[in-house]
Image (cartoon, coloured by chain):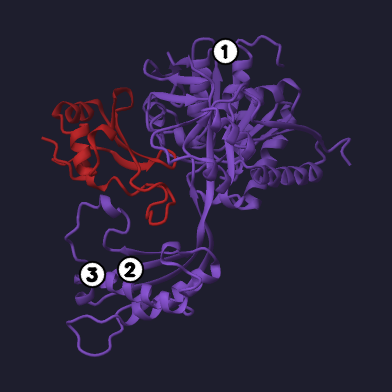
Chain colours: A purple, B red
Amino acid sequence: MVTAKFQQIRFISPVGSVGGGICSAALDEALAQAPHFIACDAGTTDAGPFSLGMGIPAFPREAVKRDLSLMLRAGRKANIPVIIGSAGTAGGDVHVDSVLEIAREIVAEHHLTLRTAVIYAEQDKAYLKRLLQQNRILPLDPAPPISDNVIDNSSRIVGMMGVEPLQQAIADGADFVLAGRCSDAALFAAIPLMHGFPPGLAWHAGKVSECGTLVCETLGKGVIFTTISQDEISIRPYGDGLRCTPLSVAAHSLYENSNPYLHRECSGTFDLTNSTFGAIDDVTVRIRGSEFIVEPYTVKLEGAALAGYQSIIVGGIRDPHVIGQLESWLAGVRSYIDESVSHVLGDELDKSSYSLIFHTYGISAVMGSLEPDQKHQPHEVGIVLEATAPTQDLAHKLAQLSRQPLLHYPIREWKGSITAFACLHNPAVVDRGPVYRFTLNHVAVPSTAVEMFRTHFIDLGGSEK
Amino acid sequence: MILADIATLIRSKNAGPFILTFDILFADLASYRHVKDSGALNPGAFAKLYRCRIEKVRFFECENALAFKFSIPRPLTQGELGDGDMHGGQQFIPLMNLEIP
């Protein structure tokens, strides 16, 4: 199919994220429209740095297996490739391998044969340090500081691949491309670009399709079916009650993007400034005019490092005297805890190596420094104390030492011993395990589009026994 | 009139771990134009509401989507110790009460 000349190219985006729950009836309906490929994103940084740092997917294995099974069987039935990107949420090697393992099970259970290209996106630290030395790692805005130490201390760093490694895999005959961290839009743009469709349209089609039915007027169960021709994109959902409207499709380019018009990819920027959106029918939208500007090749990096281990205490305060002076009361609680820690754990836990954070629900816990309503006094305040330290044992002890002062720290209004904190649990301390932070908002400038990514071909099923 | 009375959706969300983005959407061109012509939505007003430097505010008027967008650096990177809104979804509230003349 790679060399054939197409008037148009059609594809299915079955769900916004592998594991999100594909509507199989809608997938069948779309499959009857002769698509040329199926693609689906499986990752995001949206949940936070934990998945990347810890190497654990955010979706339940069973949910991923169900969706992947539907896609792989649909792909084999129609004899078209299936492309999955950002496997296992964060797209590190361990994440990709966990999805590969699921694919093996599916292939065995359904007696499929699948020429599989596995593309790894995790980055070698020595390679990144060489790039850094050559000024080939550039900050985005805003970016945390970068150094060899930042690279070394990161638990895992991935590069976000563009279309090129995917295209190589398709050109080499892959039925199933299982990619690590990857641009969402690239999953859908790769094949249309191979066939010479206009880059602005190919990329924009990927962008509007990658979130599944989120591009529709109202969210619902269904799949997205997109067609690209030489001068326009048409996009429609299959699924009960779903429709794409010019407004819903135009508005989708705002979602989770800092700039609604310019979208940077590895090979350049697609520009939606002159895009137009029109209705073809009640459920289908036509897009024209999207452009692409070629720019120096860059690969976005994502890294996560261990921030420490955490234990928490959850509870609440109802006493209006305490709530009325909560900030100064908590400052008193904090200094009491600091003092106990230095007495009890002084040798093991220096003050600079632990952190105590009080999230005060009811007073600015959600908006923090951005909260406009600083004066309102609620009748009740929920408190989550986060104690973070270099080991779980120390974090646990830090939280344990916090319980008594939280319970009993005095106020002037009451004489004698008080219990100011309504503790939710016994034991009060909940261990949360390791917590991570994002370390990079940078791009790398590689020598070639594919040097940062490693492709392995595996014949799943069939000859592989 | 306040912005929440006119907009069909005011939302905030992460645009990656380092940026917060805010969308204000309308049902019809008249509402969009009314707010646009009022001049109440601008980088200066947003910087004041969100206590950040005006040069850090990016502002977009998207007539084909009947929407306005603001983007600012996150006060705390997503997931940093102390971050209380992992997805950035509850940061739009100050925009709701913005007076629209």
In the rendering, at what x and y percent does residue B13 appear?
38, 42
Mark 1: which secondary structure?
A: loop
- In the image, what residue occupies the spot 49% across and 36% down? A213
Amino acid of disc 2: Gly
- In the image, what residue occupies the spot 55% across and 42% down? A151
Q: Cα distance, mark 1 to mark 3?
A: 63 Å
The total number of labels drawn is: 3
To the question of a shared chain for discs 1 and 3, the answer is yes
Query: Within 10 Å of the Cα at label 2, are there few (<14), some (14-19), or many (20+) other Cα atoms?
Result: some
- Pinpoint the chain carrying mark 1: A
Can you tell which of label 1 and label 3 is closer to the viewer? 3
Q: Choose between A347 and A312: the one closer to the eye.
A: A347
Q: Which mark is on residue A197?
A: 1
The residue that disc 3 covers is A328
Residue B24 picture quarter = top left
Q: Choose between A273 and A336: the one closer to the eye.
A: A336
Q: Is residue A14 visible?
A: no
Query: Within 10 Å of the Cα at label 1, are there few (<14), some (14-19), or many (20+) other Cα atoms?
Result: many
- Pinpoint the chain carrying mark 3: A
The residue that disc 2 covers is A382
If the image is split into quadrants, where does the C terminus of chain A sit?
top right
